[in-house]
Image (spheres, grey):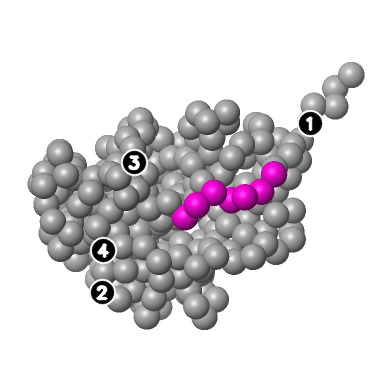
């Protein structure tokens, strides 16, 4: 299933189910209103959401409406923690908020994209197969850093269960391509090969993970020089060119022209 959080004036947004072709959505009201609720009670609530997704994909929900990514917050606006995991383990970031997919930056910053794995509860010292079992959802995220300091983390509009990833998901690994547009100009796409179970296991080497912990697998830096007024479009796609998580569209505030 594909999940998103619509902005409704609250900190966490309102949970919606999104159709496989990204054209329709339906509120998950009656099952859960926030994604964290689902992560806390996954075994009971996720099957209900999956049934709703099946009905949506078959056009059987009377109150479905056109999906609008511009109305989305990050799928999980507030997490239990955010860490970018490398070969040497996890680098813990502050537990806090994730920015919306269209949230602008006030100044140019260095972008570091990552495949983000959203976990359920996971015991300390769990191995990779156990960690893979605790994987709940995947999405695309970007860390923005200014002078080496993390200033924001932005997420794509959708979080997906692994079964939605198609032939690019096999053996607990995701294979896809990261596509970038800088000021409308296409940049070289880069191949992505990531193992979320292994990343979560590395993060859980010394401590248990709570439902809602997010582990990022670095996709390198963007390698772009950004300037005020620039725009950036990032989209992780299948080999066939279908968007997996929806796009992150970033605008950097233009220079202040006030005399």
Q: Residues within 10 Å of mark 2 (few under 14, many from 20)?
A: few
Where's residue 221, x and y in %?
A: 54, 49
Foreground disc of the pair 2, 1:
2
Q: Residues within 10 Å of mark 3 (few under 14, many from 20)?
A: many
Residue 62 can be seen in this image: no
Q: Main secondary structure of the magenta part?
A: loop
In the image, what residue occupies the spot 59% across and 40% down?
Answer: 110
SS for dot 1: loop
Position of 14 relative to 187 (above/below): above
Tally the numbered discs.
4
Between disc 1 and disc 3, whose residue precedes?
3
Provide the residue designation for mark 3: 83
SS for dot 2: loop
Q: Quadrant of residue 167?
A: bottom left
**Magenta segment:** 219-225
**Separation of disc 3 and disc 4 at Cα?**
27 Å
Where's residue 119, x and y in %?
A: 24, 51
Between disc 4 and disc 1, whose residue precedes?
4
Residue 171, numbered circle: 2
**Separation of disc 1 and disc 3 at Cα?**
32 Å
Position of 21 relative to 245 (above/below): below
Left or right, residue 133 beside residue 154: left
Left or right, residue 26 beside residue 200: right
Provide the residue designation for mark 4: 49
Seen from the viewer's position, the closer of residues 213 and 39 is 213
Q: Residues within 10 Å of mark 4 (few under 14, many from 20)?
A: many
Quadrant in the picture for the C terminus: top right
SS for dot 3: strand
**Separation of disc 4 and disc 2 at Cα?**
25 Å
**Separation of disc 2 and disc 3 at Cα?**
23 Å
Left or right, residue 10 beside residue 205: right
Residue 252 can be seen in this image: yes
């Amino acid at each position: 299933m594909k999940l998103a959080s619509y902005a409704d004036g609250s900190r966490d947004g309102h949970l919606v189910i999104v159709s496989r072709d990204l054209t329709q959505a339906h509120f998950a009201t009656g099952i859960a209103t926030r994604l964290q609720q689902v992560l806390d009670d996954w075994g009971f609530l996720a099957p209900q959401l999956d049934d709703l997704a099946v009905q949506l994909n078959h056009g059987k929900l009377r109150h479905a409406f056109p999906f609008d990514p511009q109305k989305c917050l990050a799928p999980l606006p507030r997490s239990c923690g955010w860490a970018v995991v490398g070969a040497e383990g996890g680098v813990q970031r502050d537990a806090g908020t994730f920015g919306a997919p269209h949230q602008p930056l006030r100044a140019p910053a260095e972008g570091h994209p990552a495949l983000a794995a959203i976990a359920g509860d996971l015991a300390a010292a769990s191995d990779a197969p156990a960690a893979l079992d605790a994987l709940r959802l995947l999405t695309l995220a970007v860390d923005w850093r200014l002078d080496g300091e993390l200033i924001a983390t932005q997420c794509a509009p959708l979080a997906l269960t692994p079964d939605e990833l198609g032939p690019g998901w096999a053996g607990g690994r995701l294979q896809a391509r990261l596509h970038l547009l800088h000021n409308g100009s296409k940049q070289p796409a880069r191949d992505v090969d990531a193992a979320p179970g292994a990343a979560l296991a590395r993060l859980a080497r010394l401590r248990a993970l709570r439902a809602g912990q997010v582990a990022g697998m670095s996709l390198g830096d963007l390698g772009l020089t950004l300037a005020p007024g620039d725009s950036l479009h990032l989209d992780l796609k299948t080999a066939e060119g279908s968007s997996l998580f929806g796009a992150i569209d970033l605008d950097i505030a233009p220079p202040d022209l006030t005399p």
